[in-house]
Amino acid sequence: MSAWLLKSEPEAFSIDDLLAAPGQASLWDGVRNYMARNNLVAMKKGDRAFFYHSNARPTAIVGEMVVLAEAVPDVTAFDTNSKYFDAKSSPEKPRWFAPKLRGIRKFKTPLTREVMAETDLRKSPIFTNSRLSVIPLTAADTRIIDRLLKQAGNL
DNA sequence: GCCAACGTTGGC
DNA sequence: GCCAACGTTGGC
């Protein structure tokens, strides 16, 4: 089982939006970056995922999720009215995919980027590739995150 | 709001 | 296939 960090701008889709959705679940759609897509497709049912608020104050891990269903073609790419429309993706030959995530909890004390930067997480793509919106976490990364969350009383 | 870093596009 | 120009992301 793997763990992931998924970024979203809270103005577009926040942890509160996820927890308010039916079944506290939502497709993670609209991702239009190949590396991020490959990571979305690699996510397996039951994997852990951390919800990260980007372009926010503060930027932080704000909650925890679980992968409910593996990625299916992202239908927003087929919708000409969607801001995620992509003419190069079709139902016959989909280019973009979306897994389904379920929110488990929102953390009382978000784990800020600032705090993460003081640890070996500095070596993770969270810091070395800050533009990647779907990030695989190593077992070591996950241990650090769990430790920090525990310290802050979130787990 | 600025801008660095990075990804994508398109001319050649 | 290279690379300049351009667009976007996301930290600050």
Image (spheres, coloured by chain):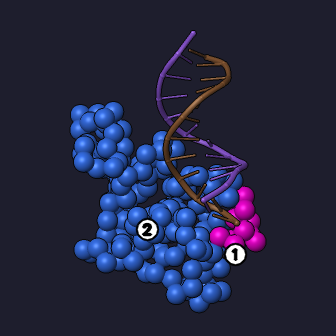
Chain colours: A blue, B purple, C brown
Q: Secondary structure at mark 1?
A: helix
Identify the image quadrant of residue A77. top left
Name the residue nearer the viewer: A17 or A63: A17
Q: Which residues are magenta?
A: A113-124
Q: State the predominant SS element of the stretch in magenta.
A: helix
Left or right: where A115 falls relative to A10: right
Secondary structure of the residue carrying numbered label 2: loop
Question: Do labels 1 and 2 touch, CB within 8 Å?
Answer: no
Q: Residue at x 23, y 34 (%)?
A: A92
Dividing the picture into quadrants, the one containing residue A57 is: bottom right
Q: Which amino acid type is marked by label 1?
A: Val
Q: Position of residue A17 (x, y in %)?
A: 36, 73
Question: Mark 2 = which residue?
Answer: A11
Q: Residue at coordinates 37% horizontally, 52% vertically from top-left?
A: A30
Mark 2, Cα crowd under 10 Å, few <14 / some 14-19 / many 20+, is: few
Residue A40 in sight here: yes
Task: Give the quarter of the image for residue A56.
Answer: bottom right
On the image, numbered disc 1 is attached to which residue?
A115
Q: Position of residue A82 (x, y in %)?
A: 28, 50
